[in-house]
Amino acid sequence: MNTTSPAGQAAEAKPVREGLDPAVIRLIVVLLTGAIPSLLDTSIVNVAVDTIGRDLHTNVSTIQWVITGYLLSFAMVIPLSGWALARFGGRAVWMSSLALFLAGSVACGAAWNIGSLIAFRVVQGIGGGMMTPLITTLLVQAVGSSQMGRLMAAVSLPVVVVPIFGPVIGGLIISNVSWRWIFYVNVPMCLAGLMLAWRHLPASRPQGGASRIDLVGLALLPPALVALLYGLAEVSTEGGFGHARVIIALSVGVAALAAYCAHALRTSATPMVDLKLFRARTFTGATALLFLAGLSIYGAMLLLPLYFQQVRHDSALTAGLLMVPQGLGSIAPRTLAGKLTDRIGPRLVVLAGIALAAVGTIPFALAGLHTNYWLLGAALVVRGAGLGLATIAVMAGAFQGLCREQVPHASSATRIVQFVGGSFGAAVLVAVILDRQAAAHAAAGAAGLASAYGYTFWWCVGFTALALIPALFLSSGSRMTVALAQPSPSR
């Protein structure tokens, strides 16, 4: 069945125009209006963690689940978006996902304790995770092939820029009203997105022939990751790895993960993460890098605002503004990273990005109570540039060595791995390392807390440097495979 909309057919039939078709522009506005709240929520909550923790009377190792739960649920539903699109149609899935995100936002704002807030953040993550892949799919179906470059230029900038201002918006809200408005602020945008989608999003019939859902994988992989993360978080609470709650949680996680791997290698359904992709050396290296990048990016995104607020005693707004240089740094190398990767291959580009990210993190490992803000701001620009350079090159290199049919599965797997890495980053850096170090240095007061953060940032540097190993598995040549030259339409 031909799924290309009338706008897409017109785009392919007419000569290439200088600008995007009005119908395509309208579709971009509709989708971005609905997507902006979920994009904001990847970063807006970070500056509120300290305030939420104090208001709900909980510690850092527990409050990090507000971030971890969102990222993990976000990742786990990504493989379901393609099945849902084929089974129910684009507009129905988009509006349902946006409505679920809206319901989760309202519930988060009304949360009565930390447990309810974490649960409702998971609901938010499910809605946001379903929407993210749909943006690209619906736009590609609408525009056809004639305006793809202009389409991606129009869409990619807001997707990158919006999360940069999340901490600033969060800081403004925390400084003036209750933290609950961090979630309530989503309501008008979500309602506007639903209204625009109802009026302007083209209705599409179910395509039929949708692949079977990997129900066994869904029953094994998410619980495995949750058990592993819970076990790691309990290391700090219980004071070490030798306690029954930690051992049981980690054992259950490892067993469920092993069961998933055995299942994924022999199932006839499309697995949540296709392990056969890892036969390609470059894909294995790229996914390991994306896991470590997610760990470093999202773990530090939680760690940095806490440092500014708890060690430097800055307001939430100041902490949000101080995070902007990292976001701006990540934008700077976007064009250069793509050109260099095409010319010399991803390996050297990634190695350079890793080096920059490590250099940009070291000043925080050495920082004390009165380290100059300009130095820290410059370090964040360097760190952001390094992470941006490495991530873009890795995403390009991940598809080398794969056949055309594997590209859609690889695209889904890379997204999942990066968000799972972010989940582990928040749990390991904050709940395990920082919490234990803060307890060990509690007697030293403010200086002890600064030392605890410095120690944790050294671990962040170490995780970044560890990425040098999988980077060596990436290609060092500029020759791209057929899969990249002729991507699958479902990518």
Image: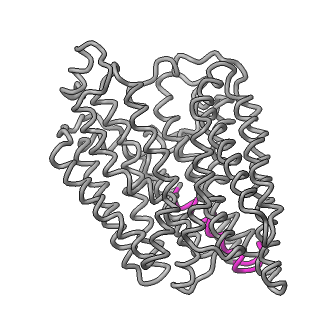
Q: Is residue 208 above or below residue 148?
A: below
Residue 112 appears at what percent x and percent y? 42, 84
Q: Chief secondary structure of the magenta span?
A: helix
On the image, which quarter does residue 28 sit in? top left
Image quadrant assignment for residue 63? bottom right
- Identified at 32% across, 20% down, the residue is 18
Location of the N terminus by quadrant is top left
Q: Is residue 139 above or below residue 462?
A: above
The answer to whether residue 12 is left or right of residue 270 is left
Where does the image place residue 135, in percent across and percent down from the top left?
Answer: 36, 41
Between residue 162 and residue 146, name the one nearer to us: 162
Relative side of 202 to 142, left or right:
left
Where is 28 relative to 7, above or below? below
Q: Which residues are magenta?
A: 222-244
Residue closer to the observer: 41 or 73: 41
Q: Is residue 296 visible?
A: yes
Where, quadrant-wise, is the C terminus in this rendering?
top left
One can see residue 255 in this view? no
Residue 280, x across and y down, in percent: 64, 28
Residue at the image position 30 percent from the left and 65 percent from the top: 187
Q: Residue at x 31, y 52 (%)?
A: 34
- Magenta-span inclusion, residue 459: no
Q: Inspect the magenta stretch and tell me whether residue 230 lies in it.
A: yes
Q: Is residue 47 left or right of residue 15?
A: right
Color encoding of the figure: one colour
In percent of width and height, residue 486 lies at 46, 18
The image quadrant of residue 387 is top right
Task: Please give the count of numbered marks on the rendered protein.
Answer: 0
50 above or below 371?
Answer: below
Q: Is residue 443 left or right of residue 40?
A: right
